[in-house]
Amino acid sequence: MTILVTGAAGFIGYHTCQRLLARGETVVGVDSLNPYYDVALKELRLSHLAMHAGFSYVKADIADREAMAEVARAFPDITAYINLAAQAGVRHSLSAPHDYTHANVEGHLVMLELARNSGKCRHFVYASSSSVYGANTKLPFSVDDRVDTPISLYAATKRAGELISHSYSHLFRIPTTGLRFFTVYGPWGRPDMAAYLFAKAIIAGEPIKVFNNGDMRRDFTYIDDIVSGVVGVLDHPPADDGVTPPYHLYNIGNNKSEHLMDFIGLIETSLGKKAIYQFEPMQAGDVKETAADISAIQRDVGFAPTTPISIGVPTFIEWFKQYHGL
């Protein structure tokens, strides 16, 4: 099977490509190398993927219709799509809103059009986010919950992607599955995310910003578990009964909400150094707690996360120290 993976140089995209290549798939990776964070990290990820004979890389913006049409012409055997390319970051969406509609709405639409026009899309899998739950106060978050109160533009664009996908499944019978990721961390992680930011500041002896005065909980999910969910879902496209749209939506989380201070404590222990705390109020667009109800993906795909933070955090720190030559 030839699979198109967008955001291939990104954190989740890189690990997904590695897993697919390891099981013998042919992977076409697309990434624009957006400078939102250090491009050198993205290029290093790509250099590892390039070691596989089954991997091809195309530098392109998924919102560029002609560029993506050229990808389709160059690789006519693509039958599955994993759209992980996106403008990430809740807080960044407050200052760069057009980046989010460009990548997360227009780019997502271009990818769905690519799949529709191919005429042979077996499954279209895409990244959504736990951020879509917004101001929802019911825990754990369920895919059956209403999600019409986003509190960030990032969340709104991710919800838009879910709705657009549903319309394509309904109109064109394209099997689509959206994945609401919950706070992903692990080796090769993004430098703008909490685990990386905390580790970097602690090593440098700089204060770490802890929002809502530390009274936060997150369903921290280790990257290997996330990828198991992505690949498992890819192998289980929704069936088309001719009545209901072939459309699925799942949470992918660790199924356990952890206190932020416990997460930081594991980073401190793994580094052998205490943090300097700078407590801050809640940030705009942020939520106090996330927790994933993963019963749907457990039932349909057999997804079962296996990595608690007590194992995942030290593994991340081991990679972090190696990457930075510490």
Image (cartoon, rainbow, N blue to C red):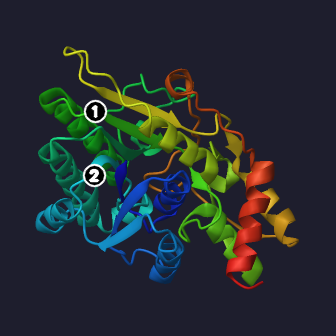
**Residue 16 spot, x, y in % from top left:** 50, 55
Circle 2: element type: strand
Distance in Å between CA atoms under marks 1 and 2: 15 Å
Q: In this view, does 8 lie to the left or right of 293?
A: left
Q: In this view, does 268 lie above or below 148?
A: below
Q: Is residue 36 above or below residue 103?
A: below
Q: Which mark is residue 175?
A: 1
Q: Residue 78 carries which label?
A: 2
Mark 1 or 2: the one toward you? 2
Q: Which mark is residue 110?
A: none
The mark that comes first in sequence, 1 or 2, is 2
Hey, what amino acid is under mark 1?
A: Pro
Hey, what amino acid is under mark 2?
A: Ile
Q: Quadrant of residue 200?
A: bottom right
Query: Pointer 2: residues within 10 angstroms few (<14), some, or many (20+)?
Result: many
Q: Can residue 48 be seen in this view?
A: yes
Query: Pointer 1: residues within 10 angstroms few (<14), some, or many (20+)?
Result: many
- The residue under the point 25% across, 68% down is 61
Q: Verify CB contact (< 8 Å) between mark 1 and mark 2.
A: no
- The residue under the point 69% across, 83% down is 324
Q: Quadrant of residue 4?
A: bottom left
Quarter of the image for the C terminus: give it.
bottom right
Q: In this view, does 194 lie to the left or right of 29?
A: right
**Residue 208 spot, x, y in % from top left:** 68, 70
Q: Is residue 48 left or right of residue 78?
A: right
- The residue under the point 75% across, 67% down is 317
Q: Who is closer to the viewer here, 252 or 3?
A: 3
